[in-house]
Image (cartoon, coloured by chain):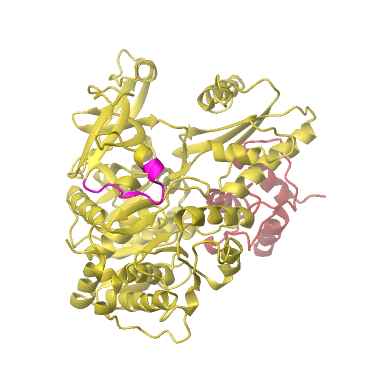
Chain colours: A red, B yellow
Amino acid sequence: MTDEITTTLATYIATEFLKQPDRLINPDEPLLSSGLVDSFHLVDLSLFVENNFGVRIDDAELNASSFDNLNQLTTFIKERQ
Amino acid sequence: MPNFSNYLQRHYEQTPDKVSITLLFAGQPDRPVTYRELIHGASGYVQTYAQNGIQPGDVVLLILQHDMDLLYAYFGAVLHGAIPSIMPFLTEKLLPERYRTDLAELVSVTRPTAIVTYREFEPEIRAALKPGEDSVKAVIVSDQAEGAAASPLNSPCPPDFAAFGGLLRKEEDVVLLQHSSGSTGLQKGVALSHRSIFNHLDAYGESIRLTQDDVIVSWLPLYHDMGLIACFLLPILGGIPVVQMSPFDWVRAPYRLFQAISTYRGTLTWLPNFAYNFCAQKIRDRDMEGVDLSSWRASINTAEPVKYKSHQMFYERFKSYGLRLETLQTSYGMAENVFAVTQNDLSKLPYVEDVDRESFASDLIARPAFDGRPAIQMMSCGKPIPNTSIRIVDRKGRDLAERHIGEIVLKSNCMLTSYYNRPDITKKAFLDDGWYMSGDYGYMVNGEVFIAGRKKDLIIVGGKNIYPQDLELLAYEVPGVHAGRASAFGLFNEATGTEDVVMVAEVDIIDPVERQKIADGIRATVTRGSAVALRYVHLVSPPWLVKTSSGKTARSANREKFLKEMQAKGQMY
């Protein structure tokens, strides 16, 4: 079963960044290195994560070496909740 | 007239302990660099260039990031009399193979003698080169340069000015190249002389009433004229302190700009229009605690179309931190005139007017709006700077009356020497009587210049120029997309203050799953081939695309068609 955090993030990215609400994002699909999420979206993503999951991502962590797919981002969030 | 090296020598001898530039790094202490350190570091590079057989007049490409190495390598090239050019760094989303191809093309046109880069990036650079065939004699790794920041010895190198080739450069010699335009390798390198740059700094300094009390704060990349001229050469040559952060750090933490202005009592910034929206929307209150913006006398909006709404949004968000409305200013510029062409008078707010939409589009006249008819809001970019003259002309080069929209042409004592090694396109850029054709459309009212559009299809995203044909070529690489059957264009987005990039492609496949794969393929290929993120990928069944009589895609017609479809579906725009 797909995690609730993962689903929420997938919907947010598809709707707000890709403007394709129906677009399914696989939990292991690369986000940053593939260009689905670009650097201007990273701040939005961190605001969204903080507002919805109560976890602050430091700006130094906003890069492809901290997370590049939804699974990694979800793990990152859970570790800090 | 003195040259760059004379200025550097004077700062070194007269104010060696003055901090010239302060580098900010995320998660590390700020790093002030005095003129003494700057010249010592640069002198190390002079030795390194000489040891590698680099001669005065040779081009040196710098593929380095925001760091001490970039400072030293740049001014080392200047002191040696070589011609530095800063190139964009490879980002994680760009395909290494694409970067290599672009670099190889650039090398074939610009014919640099040396490339300076980091050790970890050296294999990437070497992979783009053809030893013995191309012009590159040396790939210099920054940690091996004499006295380099990262060198284990880290020995300061006292300068021997008398031996430096840079002191012998003449005012008409080319001092640097700027490759700021275009998304692929065949970029035009704008070659600028010592004289042009000093003439520009004098005229522009007068326009913005620059004084020794100013402090410049910047996150702009140095491969772009706005960052290189206004926030690097102007302060360092002029003895005015500058505080710099990396664009990569700023985009992740835009509040750092405000904290830096507050900490260093910053007075001047230059920002592209999108940055006003970005900052207004994406900074938390807690990151602004204790920030005082009262020292900030001008934030100059330039490098992409200027929007009054962006200024309003920015002012409302930050006025409680001491920001003044008069701080928000405008300018219009281009690398070919060194940097600025116009500048608003800093003692006044930029002039804003509503013009009739239909006259603007159909008659090419910017008539003041009347009778509540649909209008376009325009904001002035100010008047030409003191050394630059502007005319608005029609297709035959004849002057147009006030409020008539035509091409902006200019003349000044700070024009480019040439597009480097491109005499063909240099010649084409000028009218017979020496006026430079900007390729921008605009109109004038009481000497104020308003920018109305572009002659060629060009998308500007966050101040970066993108040619749609480059993106279309990438789309054609995706299986299922045929050559000539895609169209890329920009759509202004009021929320972000810049353009969104749209790609429409005709495909024969109907199956939605297959279509999704093609759409994903287009996104990935375009992003990895150009570092440009597509906002909309719209797949359509043929015949959809509008073509010109010669069979090329008519981008503006396709743009209109896309807008109509979106509106019909009740979506944005």
Labels in figure, total: 0
Answer with left or right where residue B211 lies relative to residue B72.
left
In the image, farthest residue toward the right: A1
Range of residues picked out in magenta:
B413-426
Residue B129 rendering spot, x and y as whole percentages = 57, 62
Nearer to the camera, B153 or A40: B153
| B116 w.r.t. B147: above or below | above
Residue B425 rendering spot, x and y as whole percentages = 40, 41
Answer with left or right where residue A32 lies relative to residue B365.
right
Nearer to the camera, B395 or B285: B395
Instruction: Evaluate whether residue B431 shows in this view.
Output: yes
Nearer to the camera, B558 or B158: B158
Residue B431 rendering spot, x and y as whole percentages = 29, 34
Answer with left or right where residue A49 lies relative to residue B440.
right
Say which residue appears at 19% left-offset and 64% top-offset. B2
Residue B516 rendering spot, x and y as whole percentages = 74, 36
Say which residue appears at 49% left-offset and 70% top-offset. B138
Queried whether the magenta region covers residue B418, the answer comes back as: yes
